[in-house]
Image (cartoon, grey):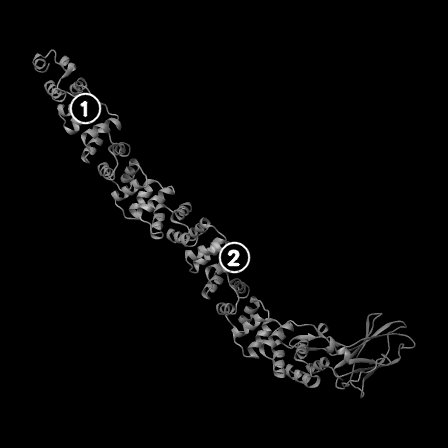
Amino acid sequence: MEQESSIRISPVQSLNGSLDPRLSFVWLPPIGDGTPAPRTFDNSLQGYITVTIENLTTGVTLDQLEILANSESNYRVNWRARNVQPGDQVQFLVEVNEVTRNGVELSPIELDPVVVTVAPNTFLNNQNVPIRFRIDNDPVIRARQLNIQGDTATQIAEQLNAEFFLTFQQSALILTNEAFTALEVAGAIVTVFDLGVSETANLLRSLGFDVIGIAQALQQVFGLGAQAAATILKDIGFVVTEVAQALQQVFGLGAQVASLILKAIGFVANEISAALQEVFALTAQATAEVLKAIGFVANEIAAALQQVFGLAAQAAANILKAIGFVANEIAAALQQVFGLAAQAAANILKVIGFIANEIAAALQQVFGLAALAAAEVLKVIGFVVNEIAAALQQVFGLAALAAAEILKGIGFVVNQIAAALQQVFGLAALAAAEILKGIGFVANQIAAALQQIFGLAALAAAEILKGIGFVVNEIAAALQQVFGLAAQAAAIILNAIGVAFNEIATVLQQVFESSLLQISQILRDAFSFSAEAIAQLLNSVFDVTNDIVASILNDLGYALEEIGEALEDVFGDVGEFFCDLVSDIPVIGDLFC
């Protein structure tokens, strides 16, 4: 196992109260005037302590003296004064020697210094100065002594417990200040004090050890697995990135397994995302994949992508789609996490590749839109009529008529709707035309759709228009304006679909603005009307006189005798115009006039 590094409280900060080694130290005359406390003198420190003498006035260190001997009640060393002048301030400092443990260089432990003014009544140059002091048994000094000797943390803890009856907190603090690792401190405290796992973890945390060191202690001292250790690390206040770091470095876990544990112990998607980004260096998409794999829903992942990776709605939606979320789930995330309304969300769904049906379902189920509102959104974001029609049919369950009404309501023209009825709903021309009429399109519009979408010729279109209830004038207008038919061609078609000649004649006048002569000519040429048949139709439909009819028939080139017979049969009288016409033809005049 690699040696851990830990954050520790410095000795100067931690040595207070009963753990202050200065309380176990006293200067004796002539340097000091202290009186030893009634405690036990520690006579084992020769070779572990040094006296440093410094001229504070000049800033020069005058000597460093190692203590190699002691009496029964104090330590003593002689110093021959040098490089001092009367009035100089000279400091005498006793230190317990430095040591290096786990690569950490620990400074000497400073005991209480004393400052003496150079003077005839103290000492002068070349004068022999006896330095005497006493150090009683002290746990901090003992720990340093044992540390210098190379004892383990457990050995030191056992000695401190046996000699000084310290609490586990005091022992742990001393060991920590002696640069022992969390693993070593935990092992020592558990061995000596039989401390439990939670107490030990809290203790190590209070001592400033980092998450790696504590995790190693939980693993190696208590034999905890990754999840149990992570639970304790979270309970004692480590944040998600720190716990993740421990799972990675101490337990050797990869991103997904570590994330599963983090989720199991109560961290949420945002927190786990931060750990995946910071500790495992995952990208936004890789993080999202892990979050989905361990059971987080689209909303939670979207929030993490937004808050941890700073992604905007479309970028987040693109990732959600890439990792397998469907349109409804992504729409809900866009609504609830990014605060998007239906149209904005739908537009993003389209941009990232969802089809109209999927978006329509999301608009219905997530945003609660009815068919018309959903269709409006689909049209605004660029879907064509067939796609919208399919969505209305398959998502909202609409039949052709209801779908066509919505398509018209949101602005599609007749041809577009006709195409949708044909291609999406599979309607033939007649059924489509019925629906187009039912939703308010007029004959001309429907005729155009029948021609352009269904490819019908004029006769077939006229038959459908008549079959769905359009009147003759509307059909004739469609034949004229849509198919470009002249009056006679239209009349032939109207006759073919069963329109009576009386109606055809009326339509020719009203729609094609044909004169009576033109109408009569069409009846003669297209339908082989006799003079009498024309006279009868003109009389019954247009209520004209026998003279007008005589003129028309004459202009059409009918024989005079045939005209006379027609006038006499229809009107009972040939009239003045005819008589004038045959006045110079005695045979015919005598017969009719």
- Side of 283 relative to 535 (left or right): right
Task: Give the amino acid at mark 1.
Answer: Leu
Regarding mark 2 in the picture, which secondary structure is present there?
A: helix
- Nearer to me, 234 or 30: 234
Q: Residue furthest right?
A: 120
Q: CA distance from mark 1 to mark 2?
A: 83 Å
- Side of 534 relative to 377 (left or right): left
Residue drawn 65% across the image and 80% down it: 168
Residue 287: mark in rendering: none
Q: Position of residue 22 (x, y in %)?
A: 77, 77
Q: Is residue 98 above or below residue 275?
A: below
Q: Position of residue 160 (x, y in %)?
A: 69, 83
- Nearer to me, 15 or 372: 372
- Side of 35 relative to 212 (left or right): right
- The residue singled out by tag 2 in the image is 306
Residue 538: mark in rendering: 1
Q: Which label's residue is closer to the chain start, 1 or 2?
A: 2
> Dot 2, crowdedness within 10 Å: few (<14), some or many (≥20)?
some
- Nearer to me, 552 or 570: 570
Residue 232 falls in which quadrant of the image? Answer: bottom right
- Side of 290 relative to 163 (left or right): left
Regarding mark 1 in the picture, which secondary structure is present there?
A: helix
